[in-house]
């Protein structure tokens, strides 16, 4: 006997066909169906048997497995010393939970128990899937691969946008047309990576878009494979190294969560669902987000060259123009004069700070700003007291050389004594100084993660340390950084409050980097700074107006030596800070949409369809004689709008005209921004 299980949110519906002797079959995942709509028949009643095919039809299930008639990619690859490599679900029980179900699946032959947790959040439109696998046999089970979640995509899915990149160049969009070939992205760098964001957006021919992202900060894969009924199978999971996971009798493993959504409004609707979901998960000090304070970060202004008097002057200059948080970056700790030494020795450098950090911290807080500190707990330099005392604490493989990157090695976060050491080095700073913010960096990829591959355990070890700091210091916010955007994901966002989006602060580069970020993460978590001109990452020069406009669409900050700018630039920056403070609630709490007009003009809109603030950016010089119109799809088509451009009260226009024909734009030069306010009358 089959039954249908249907979950709904405001915008999405998921339907499975369950029976008590197989894994639930995927019947529908897509935009919300009207109340009461269910599949007219059981799936197999609607499918004729193809020639030369198995008599028992095996459609896509929520847990497709190998060896018993499913020929596509499988949710599990595992064996017991070569045996029990073929699997089939023999029993299925369904348990209802808030907004979802847990499917309890048993393979009574291979002695496996699988629990798939599926919830569809009615407020965010995000379907969360996760998988637990328990070894119910008496011998060890070797896991080669275990998917976090398996999703269907409809037969009109056409293309997939994933994101690649590198340090200084995150969120490069990669557009691929879906075909009958397997599409697959893998990350084996040991942390989320700059190169391969663990998510993607699939677009269908009718404009519906599907999005998914894995909440995990380690290795990962995703793949899309065409299946015989014309649909596609989208799967996400951790990428596991050989023998990385073995389960002894009775042991189990839990996958990270897979977050999935879909929207008839395309990629923007997908972004909105993810923003709402990530927002819900962030654990803010005090239980609610306070207005995101204007940052000053010392890195590009000072690098390792810390001089107490200069830093105090910097703090004075920052406070004067409205900065609210001063973050002391790398260079403050014992012996750290360049990037060749000292990671691991987490006490103040007494040459630079003879009386410790208290004089600077209290100077900063005395000016009314918060004080934040940079750390990179998971790392150690060979030239450090820590490494000299505990060379065995780094991730290594016997007989293999240690491989450095940025002159550093990675501590073995699987070891409790390592995590304890780090905690007991850094906690006293938080206990004795007025530190309300940690910037937590991770500046290299993992290579040989232990004699027995331990990428996954390394990630869990890092999470445990994050958690310990969060529990003991719940009022301290944490910024996730990994050489810029190497650890941006929904897994780390449970412990952190901001991402450092990229080390590339060049405003032109930032336009596309930030746009990619906003596909998956909300603007209040997007660290975006005004850097120096020329930009350190690219050597390009941009005006203060353009740099500060680009930074204003995220969590605003400054990262250069403020003491060295002209009065004119200082006044411009102070104005941008004031504007940011005025608009941050709108940007950080409402919805955002992104899009392109013609001829290289892009835009981001914030707020609500009746009350919008739109930033229009032109990066390169126009090639059209006349500026392109700005079409905004979200406006109410039956209402009239008052429109201000750059603070100048302008015209009024019908929403239908703005949506379909577009708002005429004034001429814009390269590297300029416009701000447009639209209010429905
Ligand atoms: C990489 C980060 O992304 C930078 O912002 C800075 O904190 C440096 N590390 C410090 O070493």
Image (spheres, grey):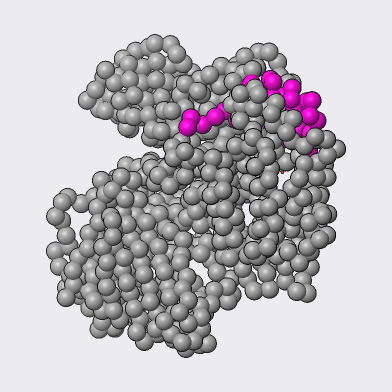
Q: Position of residue 171 (x, y in %)?
A: 54, 46
Work out which residue is located at the far front of the displayed protein and give it. 432
Which portion, as a residue range, is magenta? 290-319
Total numbered badges shown on the rendered structure: 0
Q: Nearest the camera: 568 or 670? A: 568
Q: Which residue lies at the image location 53% right of the left edge and 66% below the top edge? A: 239
| 546 falls in the magenta region | no
Residue 101: x percent and y percent?
A: 29, 62
For the question of whether residue 29 can be seen, the reply is: no
In the depicted structure, whether residue 109 falls above or below residue 435: below
Where residue 91 appears, as percent x and y from the top left, is 29, 79
Identify the image quadrant of the N terminus: bottom left
In this view, the residue farthest toward the top is 649
From the viewer's side, name the closer residue of 68 and 330: 330
Q: Quadrant of residue 613?
A: top left
> In the shown orientation, is residue 304 left or right of residue 183?
right
Q: Quadrant of ligand 1?
A: top right
């Amino acid at each position: 006997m089959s039954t249908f299980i249907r979950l709904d949110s405001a915008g999405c519906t998921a339907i499975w066909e369950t029976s008590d002797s197989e894994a639930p079959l995927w019947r529908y995942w897509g935009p919300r169906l009207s109340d009461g709509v269910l599949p007219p028949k059981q799936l197999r009643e609607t499918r004729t048997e193809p020639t030369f095919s198995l008599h028992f039809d095996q459609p896509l299930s929520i847990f497709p497995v190998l060896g018993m008639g499913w020929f596509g990619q499988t949710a599990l690859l595992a064996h017991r010393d070569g045996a029990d490599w073929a699997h089939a679900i023999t029993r299925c029980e369904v348990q209802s939970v808030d907004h979802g179900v847990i499917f309890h699946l048993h393979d009574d032959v291979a002695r496996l128990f699988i629990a798939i947790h599926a919830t569809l959040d009615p407020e965010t439109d995000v379907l969360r899937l996760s998988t637990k696998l328990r070894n119910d046999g008496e011998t060890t089970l070797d896991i080669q691969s275990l998917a976090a979640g398996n999703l269907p995509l409809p037969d009109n899915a056409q293309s997939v946008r994933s994101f690649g990149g590198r340090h200084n160049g995150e969120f490069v969009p990669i557009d691929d047309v879906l075909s009958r070939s397997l599409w697959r992205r893998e990350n084996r760098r040991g942390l989320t990576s700059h190169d391969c964001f663990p998510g993607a957006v699939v677009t269908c021919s009718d404009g519906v878009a599907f999005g998914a992202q894995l909440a995990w900060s380690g290795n990962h894969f995703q793949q899309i494979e065409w299946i015989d009924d014309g649909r596609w199978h989208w799967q996400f999971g951790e990428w596991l190294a050989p023998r990385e996971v073995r389960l002894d009798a009775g042991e189990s493993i839990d996958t990270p969560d897979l977050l999935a959504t879909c929207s008839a409004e395309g990629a923007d609707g997908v972004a909105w669902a993810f923003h709402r979901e990530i927002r819900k998960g962030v654990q803010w000090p005090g239980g609610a987000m306070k207005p995101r304070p204007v940052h000053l970060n010392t890195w590009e202004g000072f690098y390792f060259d810390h001089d107490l008097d200069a830093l105090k002057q910097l703090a004075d200059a920052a406070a004067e123009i409205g900065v609210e948080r001063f973050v002391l970056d790398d260079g403050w700790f014992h012996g750290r004069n360049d990037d060749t030494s000292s990671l691991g020795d987490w006490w103040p450098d007494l040459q630079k700070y003879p009386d410790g950090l208290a004089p600077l911290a209290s100077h900063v807080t005395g000016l009314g700003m918060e004080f934040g500190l940079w750390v990179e707990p998971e790392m150690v330099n060979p030239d450090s007291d820590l490494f000299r005392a505990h060379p065995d604490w780094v991730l290594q493989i016997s007989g293999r050389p240690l491989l450095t990157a940025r002159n550093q090695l990675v501590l073995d976060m699987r070891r409790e004594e390592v995590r304890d050491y780090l905690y007991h080095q850094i906690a006293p700073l938080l206990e004795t100084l007025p530190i309300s913010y940690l910037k937590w960096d991770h500046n290299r990829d993992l290579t040989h993660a232990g004699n027995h591959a331990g990428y996954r355990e390394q990630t869990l070890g890092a999470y445990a340390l994050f958690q310990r700091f969060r529990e003991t210091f719940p009022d301290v916010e944490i910024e996730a950084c990994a050489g810029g955007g190497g650890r941006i994901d929904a897994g780390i966002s449970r412990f952190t409050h901001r991402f450092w989006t990229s080390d590339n602060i060049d405003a032109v580069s930032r336009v596309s980097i930030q746009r990619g970020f906003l596909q998956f993460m909300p603007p209040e978590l997007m660290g975006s700074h005004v850097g120096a001109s020329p930009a350190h990452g690219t050597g390009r020069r941009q005006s203060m107006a353009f740099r500060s406009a680009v930074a204003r669409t995220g969590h605003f900050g400054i990262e250069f030596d403020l003491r060295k700018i002209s009065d004119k630039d200082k006044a411009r920056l102070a104005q941008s800070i004031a504007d940011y403070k005025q608009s941050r609630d709108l940007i950080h709490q409402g919805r955002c949409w992104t899009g392109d007009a013609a001829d290289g003009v892009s835009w981001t809109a914030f707020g609500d369809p009746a009350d919008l603030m739109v930033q229009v950016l032109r990066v390169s010089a126009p090639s059209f004689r006349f500026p392109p119109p700005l079409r905004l799809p979200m406006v109410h088509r039956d209402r009239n709008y008052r429109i201000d451009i750059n603070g100048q009260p302008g015209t009024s226009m019908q929403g239908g005209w703005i949506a379909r024909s577009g708002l005429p734009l004034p001429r814009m030069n390269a590297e300029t921004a416009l701000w447009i306010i639209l209010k429905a009358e």
